[in-house]
Image (cartoon, rainbow, N blue to C red):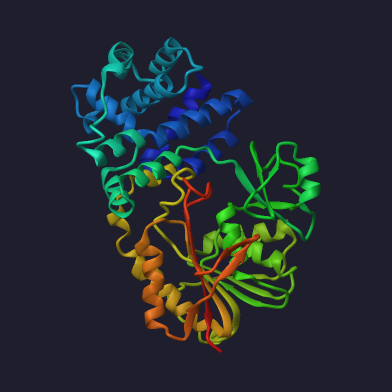
Amino acid sequence: MNARRTAFDVLIKSERSNQYSNIAVDRALEASDLAEKDRALAAAIIYGVTERRVTLDYYISRLSTRAVEDIDPDALCAVRMGLYQLIYMDRIPPHAAVNETVALCRKNLSGFVNALLRAYMRRGSEIELPSEENAPAEYLSAAYSVCPPLSEKLIAEFGYDRAKSILQSSFDTPRTTLRVNELRTDKGELMRNIKNAVPSDISSQGLKISGSVRNTFGFDTGMFFVQDEASQICVNAVSAKEGDVVIDACSCPGSKSFGMAIDMKNKGKIFSFDLHKSKLSLVRDGAKRLGIDIIETRVGDGRVFLPELEGAADKVLCDVPCSGYGVLAKKPELRYKNPAVSAALPDIQLAILSNCARYVRKGGTLVYSTCTILPEENEKNVKRFLAQNTDFRLEGFEYFGRECLSGTLSLYPDTDRTDGFFIAKMIKNG
């Protein structure tokens, strides 16, 4: 009951506050006295219900005479939890899934919740999803738990089969990827001491682990930090070296600044900017843990020109705010964000890129990156920038033994097994 109560409370709180589930889970579990097994159950239910919400609501709409939006929020949360356990958690006995979920509810709601869960047990197998042939967008929405506008957008950009493949991969549970802090250790030492670590097959500095990061050997002593392989490739494309002056225009939470500082052997200067002052503590605290002292954090809007930095940087990285559709597996709430909400982002991204390009010295490097897969934020934006800034050109690059001759690289979770990510490397003509 304690695990389910924790899950119920976190889901209700996340729904009301629009807080990301991973943040809510971390805080709730840290504050709880749950045993490890119960922590795992609570986390599984929270993430699972969040990730499968559209699918669960589809079933609820077929089981209930009330519209989903008319159901009491507490009752709706409980039904989602119960259905998730019945459909996706085969190690939990159905009677436990039903009875212990119903017990979470106020007395005036328990009968409704009990009736819907038992209705699913009787006839859930008879409920059909929308027709894949006749209603492809509706099918992808219900089957892969994304809002209909997102399924429509992915079909329009990639075609039905590829959209399905991308959404299918969003249910994969990626192992956590670490970047070795070569200022303090090497990959060999970490692999000898982290028993479940395996080397990345994409990044020479990457290790994949499972389990708690904070309880992993080397965390407290700053021997590594968390960074997806796609992000490591981005840092590799920047090619920062000892003595460089580097600007990280949108730096928080800091992993790219950390990676560049390590590549620079902690010699040179990195200006790490972010629009939000409160977030910059993540960069400062991370740098301190890793033993990095060449990073200077500053509050700044990447669209606002700073005359003192004009032509001052050897390398500039613009990892711009984006729609985030490349990281659905890590941020399941993004499944329910209508792409129309992000319609203004390409112009904001272009404004950041165009402004920060002024900081690059002649012969210097400008790297643009996003964690989305939408072309208007990626390839199309780079084409717009190059058309307006003829003193820049794309530059091919190598990353960990592979080549990207075109200067632009798109990574996808279904084919590359990384975050969905885009990287463009450009050089300012000398």
Residue 407, x across and y down, in percent = 51, 70
What residue is drawn where x is 57% and y is 85%? 361
Question: Is 131 situated left or right of 273 in this image?
Answer: left
x, y percent for residue 13: 41, 37
Note whether 227 is above or below 359 in the view shown: above
Q: Quadrant of residue 147?
A: top left
Q: Is any atom of residue 254 visible in this view?
A: no
Q: Quadrant of the C terminus?
A: bottom right
Q: Is residue 425 visible?
A: yes
Which one is nearer the viewer's eye here, 139 or 79?
139
Camera-side residue of 175 and 37: 175
Quadrant of the rendered image containing residue 95 = top left
Q: Residue at x 23, y 32 (%)?
A: 131
Q: Give above or below for 79 relative to 371.
A: above
Residue most extreme to the bottom: 430
Q: Residue at x 37, y 80 (%)?
A: 387
Residue 248, placed above or below residue 330: below
Quadrant location of residue 266? Answer: bottom right
Q: Nearer the viewer, residue 284 or 271?
A: 271
Q: Position of residue 158 (x, y in %)?
A: 34, 52
What is the x, y in percent for residue 366?
53, 75
